Amino acid sequence: LIWRQNCRIRAQSSNGTAGDGFVLEDVPHLTDFLPGLLSYPNPLQNSKAYAIVRQTFVTPEDAVAENIVVQKDSPRGVHFRRAGPREKVYFKSEEVRACIVTCGGLCPGINTVIRELVYGLNYMYGVDDILGIEGGYRGFYSKNTVSLTPKLVNDIHKRGGTFLRTSRGGHDTNKIVDNIEDRGINQVYIIGGDGTQKGADLIFKEVEKRGLQVAVAGIPKTIDNDIAVIDKSFGFDTAVEEAQRAINAAHVEVESVENGVGIVKLMGRYSGFIAMYATLASRDVDCCLIPESPFYLEGRGGLFEFVEERLKENGHIVIVLAEGAGQDYVAQELHPIDEKDASGNRLLLDVGLWLSQKIKDHFTNVRKMAINMKYIDPTYMIRAIPSNAADNVYCTLLAQSAVHGAMAGYTGFTVGPVNSRHAYIPIARVTETQNTVKLTDRMWARLLASTNQPSFLNSNEVIPEKADQETMEVVNDMRITSI
Ligand code: ATP
Ligand code: MG
């Protein structure tokens, strides 16, 4: 095997057999650019509670396969370094000065990750110098910090949001690294989404350029579950579970009236995982619309026809849609907004309000049918809750893996499960692409089989007539709006 640091290589097999095709996409280690430094015995070895860990230290050569379903004689494919405690560590516990920062939007579980980073550093490795950088990346140079102790963060996992607060924009790599240097920080834990991880990669590269003894570890956060490579992101399970309450509310509402049409808008800017899983979990959803699957309204096989069918059959219908669904379609009618947020992300048009109005107009004006429209946008309700049991366990593993990795001297890595095994993944690998729902995958087929909704695949798209520009109240909570 050829093991290489910090780059992707197509490796030859250990025994030289052509076709083995083992590839390790490795993460950098501090000794790559600071050679000759000593390794210390892992303090876990002396801990009574962790005596058993002695047998389960991860050997540095262990790797996790990206693909577990392979064909006979096919190349062994891409692997990542397995996460976990190493027998030798790079940092001496009393010399560690760690910091934690949270950036981007809210997601259930951030507080659990913060808590477990602090506990992991302190209980497992005896580190007691841990700084919380407040208010996202700009907190590094606006000098807002808090000293984190297990006692201080003991209860924070029971609350939603982020104990350290967050922000968008304000990433100035040089200023951040200057600050890391000035404060004598040597472990940086960065919790955030795709934008945050891109920022973390720049911080790592600048740290490397300056030859600093600083480990940079990313913990991926995205409620949309759109981070590439890893199995799923924390907060996703909680979001799917909480979305059930909104779907249930919509169902109860539309079941109780004549021709009830319920629309629930869920998160998912570019990928429809939350909408897809919430639909599969719920059984009350008649139709799920996601960004990856373009839909159309009019004509044969269109959404209007389907809504009418279900109203005639059942007297009501529930539609779940992801916020990024049908954006191109909506933009044909509404003025495309070219606005961006502070981090440079494009602001989306409100497809939920648009669709509610279109359905209402169609049935009232064209089909002359009275319908009862109920539109629910539970986005902020979902983002703000604490994580559920499964996510709490998952966040604990993520945080502990990150601590083990940084203590071992790995840097420039993101941590996450790949085929259920936690691994260290080069940061750039998780930011170069986004995970999206593959319409040709089995899961989408399962959803279509479960809802029996149109696939919107075989008809020509009908461009709708110019919509009226009636403004509608934006409802960003669980209140139900009758339109
Ligand atoms: P989410 O989209 O899930 O809310 P995110 O991490 O993608 O999370 P952003 O607001 O895009 O959220 O970014 C968070 C932080 O990362 C901001 O401070 C932003 O300045 C910084 N950032 C975003 N994109 C980049 C980039 N390409 N390079 C450097 N920093 C970036
Ligand atoms: Mg993002």
Image: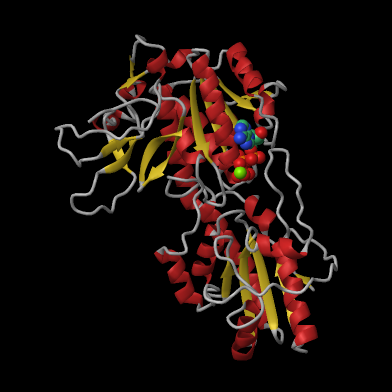
- Where is residue 337? Give x, y as percent: 77, 52
Q: Does the rendering let one see residue 159? A: no
- Percent of width and height locating residue 328: 67, 61
**Quarter, ligand 2:** top right
Please give the name of the residue rendered at 41% of the width and 63% of the height, measured from the top-left corner. 441
Q: Nearer the viewer, residue 29 or 237?
A: 29
Number of numbered discs overlaid on the protein picture: 0
Residue at 59%, 17% in the rendered image: 180
Question: Which quadrant of the rendered structure holds the C terminus?
Answer: bottom right
Q: Does 3 sit above or below residue 465? A: above
Q: Report the coloring of the rendering.
A: secondary structure
Q: Whole-percent x and y of residue 414?
A: 46, 35
- In the image, taking residue 165 as reference, residue 92 lies left or right, namely left
Q: Residue at x 53, y 13 (%)?
A: 210
- Quadrant containing the N terminus is top left
Q: Is residue 418 above or below residue 153?
A: below
Q: Residue furthest right?
A: 470
Drawn side of residue 362 relative to residue 457, left or right: right
337 relative to 89 in the view: left or right? right
- Horizontal side, residue 104 vs residue 58: left or right: right
Q: Residue at x 28, y 30 (%)?
A: 57
* Residue 30 percent location from the top left of the image: 41, 18
Is residue 10 among what the camera can see? yes
